[in-house]
Amino acid sequence: MHRRSLLRLAGGGAIAAATAGLPGCSSALPDEAIAAWRGPGDEPDPRRWALSYALLAPHSHNLQSWLVDLSVPGEITLFIDRTRLLPETDPFSRQMLMSQGTFIELLEQATRQKGHRADIALFPEGEFGPAAVDARPTARIRLVPDASVRPDPLFAQVLRRRTNREAYEPRVPEASAREAIARSTSAHPFRTGFVTADDAEAIEHHRRIAKEAWRIELTTPRTVLESFKVLRVGPREIAAHRDGLSVNDPMVRVATALGLFDRSVAPAPGDRAVQSQIDGFNAKIDTTPAFYWLVTEGNDRVTQVNAGRAWVRTQLAATEQGLSMQPISQALQEYPEMGALYREIHERLQASAPRFTVQMWARLGHAPAVQPAPRRGLQAHILKA
């Protein structure tokens, strides 16, 4: 969900020279990669219509690990695509379950728009254990026509929602906007809150943790290689995959074409490109005027799914308020090298494990408009009979 500009090569006169005058070398994403953001049009099947919105949900690393079975009329059975997991940075698939929740939330909102009620049964064949996911479904959703259902006002923001990784304006989001964001998840028994630049000492602690967590992930070989595996460089790769972490920067495209960027090898310690990425990330964190957080009591699979539902509602509410958000997930990841920062952010938010879990931590503020993330389209998610 947060590493799309994973690598920007620094320096290199030869690369810069090769880039100059390169025809059509734009950083804009290819049209076919973002076609899903135009909506489903006149799709007559309410399930397919709703699913066309659900697949626009935020997902870790933009992997879109959603598979649906439509073989039973009026029903949707949702599975995790276990070929699209993050075993290094998300070893217990907590973030994957949250990403199932974001999908379910948008599906339910879209269903309301069509005058249907979504009867949602989570884990209809049993809940996954705490260590791994398996082949059982995440949810079974039955669509029932119901004249009493009312549209969710947040649905109007689905096609406008973005994850914004750019520098933010220094102004602190207004209290009224933060209150609207908090209200968006009031139906869930979760604790949410904000840290703003009005509390200079507190926000500096948050900025420091975010920076150090990013450095750890980017300099730990197996975690950075996990991101490299889903890195899509240039319009051809982006259009072919329509998922993962898209990099369309002309410098990186030329470096890749010249064989100067090997995605099968972790960068060496002190690598200039990695340090450039760290410096760029740190500069953006320093502009962050507010952080949002979401804490749950317990961390079972149902709680994780519902935390995902709450998170996408938060992003939609922020969009409605003219604000941008970016998950800062690194310090929440449960692998050994991140252990000290994981404990620190939990303690700082008065969420000591194992009773509590910080499910989401994100930047919040005003930022320039950005493009949507690529999406694979509906057919890629439908299980074949």
Image (spheres, rainbow, N blue to C red):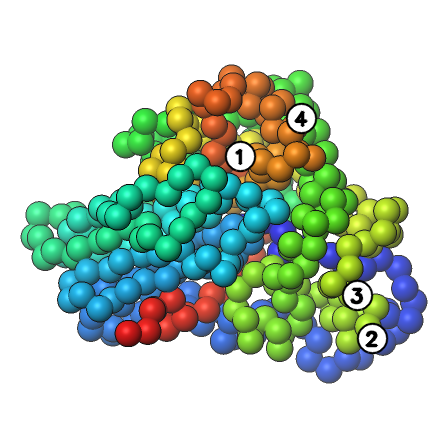
To which residue does mark 4 refer?
340
Provide the secondary structure element on which disc 3 rests. loop
* Residue 215 quadrant: top right
Q: Earlier in the sequence, mark 1 or mark 3?
A: 3
Is there CB contact under 8 Å for labels 1 and 2? no
Mark 1: few, some, or many residues within 10 Å (few <14, many ≥20)?
many
Q: Earlier in the sequence, mark 4 or mark 3?
A: 3
Q: Residue at x 77, y 71 (%)?
A: 256
**Image vertical order of residue 80 relative to residue 363, above or below:** below
Q: CA distance from mark 2 to mark 3?
A: 8 Å
Provide the secondary structure element on which disc 4 rests. helix
Q: Residue at x 75, y 49 (%)?
A: 221
Foreground mark, 4 or 3, reads 4
Q: Amino acid at mark 4?
A: Ala
Q: Earlier in the sequence, mark 1 or mark 4?
A: 4
Q: Amino acid at mark 2?
A: Leu
Q: Residue at x 31, y 53 (%)?
A: 137
Across and down, in percent, residue 52 comes to 33, 65
Provide the secondary structure element on which disc 2 rests. loop
Residue closest to the far bottom: 23
Q: Which mark is residue 261?
A: 3
To which residue does mark 2 refer?
258
Q: Amino acid at mark 3?
A: Phe
Mark 4: few, some, or many residues within 10 Å (few <14, many ≥20)?
few
Residue 55 visible (yes or no)? yes
Q: CA distance from mark 4 to mark 2?
A: 39 Å
Q: CA distance from mark 1 to mark 2?
A: 38 Å
To which residue does mark 1 refer?
361
Residue closest to the far left: 147
Foreground mark, 4 or 2, reads 4
Q: Amino acid at mark 1?
A: Trp
Across and down, in percent, residue 230 comes to 61, 61
